[in-house]
Image (tube, rainbow, N blue to C red):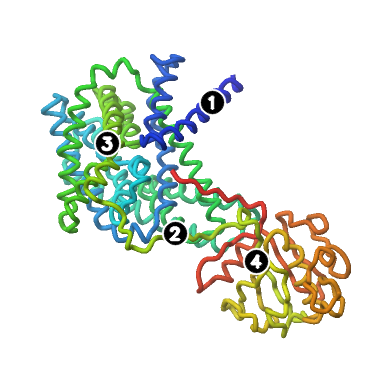
């Protein structure tokens, strides 16, 4: 049974990966293809798998949403979101209230739903999905003020929507509106405080604790983000807001091995989306959707044409944005993961008509995503909204492991007895392809010039390409043992000829400069473990290990971010959804 299950799951994942390729070419959000995979597998589909466990779907959906929000927070750039925070906060609170009221009125008077069912639908479909929006806007770059508002709104509005849906789905009379407003304000405040605190404490710990392997950093980051959700929920706050804010703090903290962490979180985000949407596709019964098709069209029309534009224009009125930008943001209110997952809450609570509510939400999300998704780029061009070419473009510079750059970072600590004291940087005569890029002296870091004189207890950051890594290390050891005349005195690390380039393969492998690294073979490029060289008697120490994260943090304090890894085996994956 296990083998068959693993085979089916792996095939579903492979099909979903291929679906991403199709969606990137067609401009359709990939969520529709994932839902289609679930429907094809489920009842009335090819394999006719019957699945009706709404409670399990809700649990898995919540877990997937936590991962998706964590991944979104890690990828949120503070400099883009910060100017948009006030507008996004109003849009995700006041705007949500307007959208819920208008949509619920339409569902009640036009479709004939009871007020409880109408309010649940109004709340469920008021949450937007930034991932769906940006997946169809890859070819139409927008100004950061628009993307910042949409991105922050999608991270913030999940929290009040969840609170409303849970309140409307509770057995018994619905609480007064002012009670709900007070509960929402309190839960958002608690969630925000816990999220910011957990994110700050987590980033502080990760920057000051050197983990033994680079692969542990992504796990630690995701664990911290998920713990923010759990802490927020246990404190009766908004766990979704907590995980988003904690992840955003972590994502803007210049953590060690950041590209590997982003790649890991990105992969988890894709996996969560695939699993959640396939499961939601399994839960739906296609032949039951026919009866609710037109009611879904009516509710979606009210939401798209009336509720969403009204909420955007009213909420953003104080911010004096151009009407064409408000129009685009009104049309960009795509629905995705959250509405369908939240539609399972009334099913689990046993609310009358909850199955019909789920069917209406499912049809609405699918049809209107098909309608809005492909037309978003056209609307942006028609409104002449695009990124201002006069604005300075983001260079995309990041702190990254050097594996894909085919290089190494070597940390060099000069002991008190080393003969490297008094040697100028230019007199090190490192092989071509190696250079001293940073010096830390008395707790202060600076970029050295060729005439900079090295001193005792200095710490150096040396960058070397793969072919000259061993030669650079040998030359550094030789100068540490014999001073700047090491090449002439035959103290290893050189050919023994005056003026020759020190650190040849011969000098790196044999002679007095020959070393054997602990935990690895002679002359190897490092085994990912400690690589400290020389006897205790004052030899220069050269490190090329995962523990460079700690040193690099010290080296770059006050002058910016530098790559914090010298481990040749460090993972470096950068994907974009």
SS state under label 1 = helix
Position in image of residue 470 (x %, y %): 76, 63
Does residue 168 lie above or below 219 as drawn? above
Who's the residue at 21% across and 35% down the image? 122
Mark positioned earlier in the residue sequence (2 or 3): 2
Which one is nearer the viewer's eye here, 387 or 536?
Answer: 387
Q: Quadrant of residue 165?
A: top left
Q: Residue at x 52, y 59 (%)?
A: 255
The disc, 4 or 1, on the residue closer to the chain's N-terminal end is 1
Residue at 37%, 48% (x, y): give it. 235
- Distance from disc 2 to disc 3, alpha carbons, whole Å, reads 32 Å
- The numbered mark at residue 569 is none
Which of the 4 image quadrants contains residue 106? Answer: top left
Q: How many marks?
A: 4
* Foreground label between 1 and 2: 1
Residue 22 is left or right of residue 500, and the answer is left
Residue hosting label 4: 463
The residue at 72%/85% (across/down) is 422
Mark 4 nearby-residue class (10 Å; few <14, some 14–19, many ≥20)? many
Q: From the image, tell me which residue sits under label 2.
A: 252
> What distance separates the C-alpha of mark 1 from that of mark 2?
36 Å
Q: Secondary structure at mark 3?
A: helix
Q: Which mark is residue 11?
A: 1
In what element is the residue under mark 2? loop
Q: Is residue 21 above or below residue 497?
A: above
If you read the primary sequence from the N terminus, does the residue marked by circle 4 or circle 2 appear first?
2
Percent x, y of residue 353: 24, 22
Cβ atoms at labels 4 and 2 below 8 Å apart = no
Side (left or right) of 199 relative to 388: right
């Amino acid at each position: 049974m296990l083998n068959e299950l693993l085979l089916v799951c792996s095939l579903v994942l492979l099909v979903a990966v291929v679906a991403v390729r199709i969606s990137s070419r067609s401009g359709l959000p990939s969520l529709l293809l994932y839902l289609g995979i679930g429907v094809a597998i489920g009842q009335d589909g090819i394999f006719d798998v019957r699945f009706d466990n709404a409670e399990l779907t809700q649990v898995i959906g919540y877990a997937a949403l936590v991962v998706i929000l964590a991944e979104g927070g890690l990828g949120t750039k503070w400099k883009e979101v910060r100017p948009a925070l006030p507008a996004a906060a109003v849009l995700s609170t006041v705007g949500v209230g307007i959208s819920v009221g208008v949509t619920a009125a339409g569902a009640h008077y036009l479709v004939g739903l009871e007020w409880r069912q109408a309010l649940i639908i109004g709340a469920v479909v008021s949450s937007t999905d930034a991932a769906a929006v940006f997946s169809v806007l890859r070819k139409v770059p927008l100004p950061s003020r628009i993307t910042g508002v949409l991105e922050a709104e999608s991270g913030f509005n999940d929290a009040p929507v969840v609170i409303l849906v849970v309140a409307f789905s509770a057995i018994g009379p619905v609480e007064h509106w002012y009670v709900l407003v007070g509960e929402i304000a309190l839960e958002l405040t608690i969630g925000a405080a816990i999220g910011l605190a957990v994110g700050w404490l987590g980033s502080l710990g990760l920057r000051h604790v050197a983990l033994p392997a680079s692969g542990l950093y992504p796990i630690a980051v995701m664990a911290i983000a998920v713990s923010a959700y759990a802490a927020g929920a246990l404190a009766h706050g908004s766990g979704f807001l907590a995980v988003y804010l904690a992840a955003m703090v972590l994502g803007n903290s210049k953590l060690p091995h950041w590209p590997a962490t982003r790649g890991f979180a990105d992969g988890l985000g894709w996996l969560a989306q695939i699993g959640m949407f396939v499961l939601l596709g399994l839960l739906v019964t296609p032949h039951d959707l026919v009866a609710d098709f037109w009611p879904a069209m009516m509710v979606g029309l009210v939401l798209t044409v009336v509720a969403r534009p009204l909420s955007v224009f009213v909420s953003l009125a104080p911010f004096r944005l151009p009407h064409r930008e408000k129009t685009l943001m009104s049309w960009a209110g795509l629905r995705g993961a959250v509405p369908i997952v939240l539609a399972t809450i009334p099913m689990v609570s046993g609310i009358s008509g909850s199955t019909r509510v789920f069917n209406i939400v499912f049809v609405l999300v699918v049809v209107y995503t098909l309608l809005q998704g492909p037309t978003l780029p056209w609307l942006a061009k028609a409104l002449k909204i695009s990124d201002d070419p006069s604005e300075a473009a983001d260079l995309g510079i990041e702190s990254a492991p050097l594996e894909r750059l085919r290089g190494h970072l070597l940390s060099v600590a000069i002991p008190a007895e080393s003969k490297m004291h008094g040697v100028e940087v230019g007199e090190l005569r490192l092989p071509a392809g190696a250079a001293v890029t940073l010096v830390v002296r008395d707790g202060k870091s600076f970029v050295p010039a060729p005439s900079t004189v090295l001193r005792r207890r200095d710490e150096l950051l040396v960058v070397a390409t793969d072919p000259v890594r061993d030669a650079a290390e040998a030359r550094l050891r030789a100068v540490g043992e014999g001073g700047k005349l090491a090449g002439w005195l035959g103290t290893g690390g050189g050919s023994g000829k005056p003026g020759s380039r020190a650190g040849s393969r011969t000098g790196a492998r044999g002679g007095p400069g020959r070393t054997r690294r602990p935990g690895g073979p002679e002359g190897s490029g490092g085994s990912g473990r400690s690589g400290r060289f020389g006897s205790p008697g004052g030899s220069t120490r050269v490190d090329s290990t995962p523990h460079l994260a700690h040193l690099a943090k010290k080296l770059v304090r006050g002058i910016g971010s530098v790559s914090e890894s010298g481990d040749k085996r460090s993972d470096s994956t950068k994907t974009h959804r």
